[in-house]
Amino acid sequence: ARRKLRIEYFAILRERAGVDCEELDTEASTPAELFEELSQRYAFPVPGQLKVAVNDEFSDWQTLLADGDSVVFIPPVAGG
Amino acid sequence: ARRKLRIEYFAILRERAGVDCEELDTEASTPAELFEELSQRYAFPVPGQLKVAVNDEFSDWQTLLADGDSVVFIPPVAGG
Amino acid sequence: MNLFKLSAESLRPENFREHLRDPACGGFSTFEGWVRNQNEGREVMELEYQAYEPLAVKEGCRIVAEASQRYGSSKALCVHRVGDLAIGELAVWVGVSAPHRDAAFAACRFIIDEVKHRVPIWKKEHYSDGNSGWVNCEACAEQAANSRVSSSRRA
Amino acid sequence: MNLFKLSAESLRPENFREHLRDPACGGFSTFEGWVRNQNEGREVMELEYQAYEPLAVKEGCRIVAEASQRYGSSKALCVHRVGDLAIGELAVWVGVSAPHRDAAFAACRFIIDEVKHRVPIWKKEHYSDGNSGWVNCEACAEQAANSRVSSSRRA
């Protein structure tokens, strides 16, 4: 069961991926599996407080991803 | 021992005295005595937190007044 | 800069702000006191501030300097209006810059609290029922009530 | 009004203030975050803010609404810069009007604290020694240090 996902990168992850966003055909069925897959490809760091958003809302790492979902990994924020 | 004092009035005391300031020839030797004298003349209210300043600095009620001193009675403040 | 000023003119915060800039500061906290349309359940039409200027400025400057010492803030300014003010007008402005936001907030709060308690400035409220009163002066209010009673008896 | 916005343009506080006026409010508290020339002992030359815009605005608006509910403040606005900022530039502005100053201060403080922790905005500092780093990201810094070490070994 493969799905097409849209991934947008920010901060340190954008620098490592070398792209702002990309579309991906993947077998990853959860954000956790997806991060694992991308980590290997891009040698992502694993920041202590990594969060994830699916379709522009904070999400669980075990949420089931659907075809067409957008995913954003959120390293520790530092606004203000 | 009489002395000449300059008294400036503010807020409720100005309204009661009917003048902004005045010069006074008086036998009062302390701010406490002076307020007593003026209270009788102007029927001043006695606000709970009345303070006094002599020569533009907060002062004690028992300070000895000298000829030429300026005195201001300070009813409860309400800035801000 | 640590300064307290009185102003008979409308306060313009955008002018004050510039004096408090500091490249070593990451936090800037301001407080503005506005004239409210009501106080303790009574409808307020306008306000009048009177200040004993020489001592108000002295005591105000002491407060602003104390704030910087206590909280390690960098620059602070407080400006207080005097005269007649309409509803919504700016009565007092406080601004504090500091390396971090804790100090900026704490110093700003300290200044407005102390100014309200220590600086010889008086506020007279004019109410929609035609009465008026000096704020915080219970003895004054009582006597005002008495004088109203006696004047109506006389009438 | 309870609102959170992002801006790629310089922030002009005098424009925001007008939106928060309320004749029933006596207190108005603001906080400004300025770009400091140093952080944790390192000299900072400039900053870069990146935001995940749709979620940043959503979460920011939630924070501002929470502040009003918690503290009974009347109107609140928070505007955060994105893009490249020089030393001294305004990075974030928070303003809150409330009937009294307790609520104004508390709500303003709540908003800036929560924004710093919850809103997906990232800050990259560029240091005078030529290095740069994403703030709050220890793992990133470590790897950056490692990559510096390995590249110097390779050199």
Image (cartoon, coloured by chain):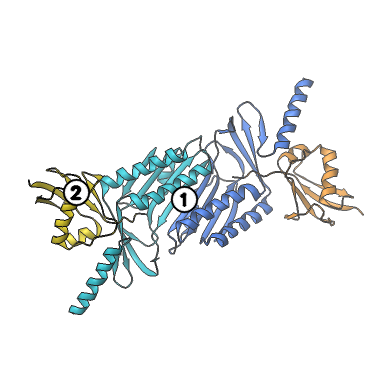
Chain colours: A yellow, B orange, C blue, D cyan
Residues marked 2 and 1 touching at CB (< 8 Å): no
Extreme residue toward the left, this view: A1
Question: Is residue D78 among the parts visible in the rendering?
Answer: yes
Q: Amino acid at mark 1?
A: Glu
**Res D129 → quadrant:** bottom left
The CA distance from mark 2 to mark 1 is: 42 Å
Residue holding disc 2? A71
- Looking at the figure, which quarter contains the C terminus of chain C? top right
Identify whether D151 is placed above or below D67: below
Disc 2 residue type (three-letter): Val
Q: Position of residue D145 (x, y in %)?
A: 27, 71
Q: Could you tell whether B49 is left or right of B68 in the image?
A: left
Mark 2 vs mark 1: give the one in front: 2
The residue sitting at 53% across, 53% down in the picture is C108
Secondary element at image label 2:
strand
Examine the rendered structure and indicate whether residue D66 appears above or below residue A47. above
Q: Nearer the viewer, residue C25 or A65?
A: A65
Frontmost residue, D147 versus A79:
D147
Judging by the rendered image, the residue that carries numbered circle 1 is C14
SS category of the residue bearing label 1 = helix
The image quadrant where one finds the N terminus of chain C is: bottom right
